[in-house]
Amino acid sequence: MFEELVRRQHGVLSRQQAYDCGLTKAQVEHRVSAGRWQPMAGRIFATFSGPPPREAVLWAALLRAGRGAVLSHHTAAEVQGLTDRHLGTVHLTVPGERRIRPIPGVVVHLRNTLETARHPTRSPPQTRIEETVLDLTQQAGDLDEALGWLVRAVGRRLTRPHLILHATRRRSKLRWRAELQAALADIVDGCHSLLELRYLRDVERAHRLPAGVRQATRPRRGGRWYDDVHYPRYRLRVELDGRAAHPAELRWRDARRDNAAAVAGEITLRYGWTDTTEDPCAVAHQIAAVLHRNGWPNSPHPCSPNCPVATPPPTY
């Protein structure tokens, strides 16, 4: 029992757990004085010498927080693969009726409905991935950051949009509820990045362009091409790339894809983060020009009095 507990908790246990496993106070104190064990937080010990690994630090924080504590927010995101950043601070959530003393290096959140948010099987104890995502959206500095957590969770195949949607409905208070739920529907329809969401919202919908097909596929030798947005009736493909720079092999891959589209009589337009977020009206104006040239019978709608799509589309 003792060995299994220590293994499961990455070498960390509380004094009470040691007593429950049959060790006496004298035996615990001897291990500590001999340097075989080391104090970590309060009455929590590491059953090894040397610097404790991250997993041991997390377990020490959980045991120090006590009954019902789970990893949450950025720390849950860390262990669940939602983020690659390891913050020094540990985020925990405990039942709402509990009050615990401050723990150095630990941020404690209170939640009245923690039992429904807690993952039933994962170790160490942690919130469900959908709850982690929503916790992070509520701590986001702006809506774009909040939407980024949705896209990342689904893009990394950690959960599915409908599961996050169900989680939003279980919360009585949720900042940006309508925007988050709308974005989840767009993710279902094929928006795989925050940039694609911004294009859909600020370029296509804001200017009433025709609805494109997201993640459209076309065959190629040995596989398929995936196009971010395709307007098949008007022979236009739009590629959106938020990367600051392309490795050489990706640039050549993109060039081959564009060349294949050109051979098929299609035009490919490419836009990055700056184009789409800082001047979406100019992007819409340019796309409208290609759509018009290829037979679109309607006109784009200006999103504001100064929007350039209020003027006739340019010809190139």
Image (cartoon, rainbow, N blue to C red):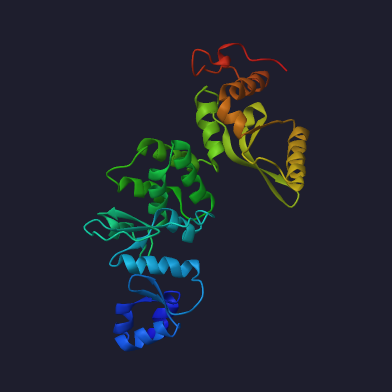
In the foreground, 13 or 290:
13
Q: Position of residue 145 (x, y in %)?
A: 47, 41
* Left or right, residue 286 beside residue 120: right
In the foreground, 14 or 278:
14
Residue found 50% across the figure and 45% down from its top = 151
Residue 215 drawn above or below residue 51:
above
Residue 290 drawn above or below residue 84:
above
Quadrant holding the N terminus = bottom left
Residue 305 visible in the displayed image = yes
Q: Residue furthest left?
A: 97
Quadrant for residue 24, please give it: bottom left
Quadrant for residue 69, please give it: bottom left
Residue 46 drawn above or below residue 65:
below
Quadrant holding the C terminus = top right
Residue found 46% across the figure and 51% down from its top = 160
> How many discs appear?
0
Residue found 44% across the figure and 79% down from its top = 7
Residue 122 visible in the displayed image = no
Q: Position of residue 42 (x, y in %)?
A: 33, 70
* Left or right, residue 135 beside residue 79: left
Q: Position of residue 52 (x, y in %)?
A: 49, 71
Q: Position of residue 164 (x, y in %)?
A: 40, 49
Residue found 45% across the figure and 39% down from its top = 183
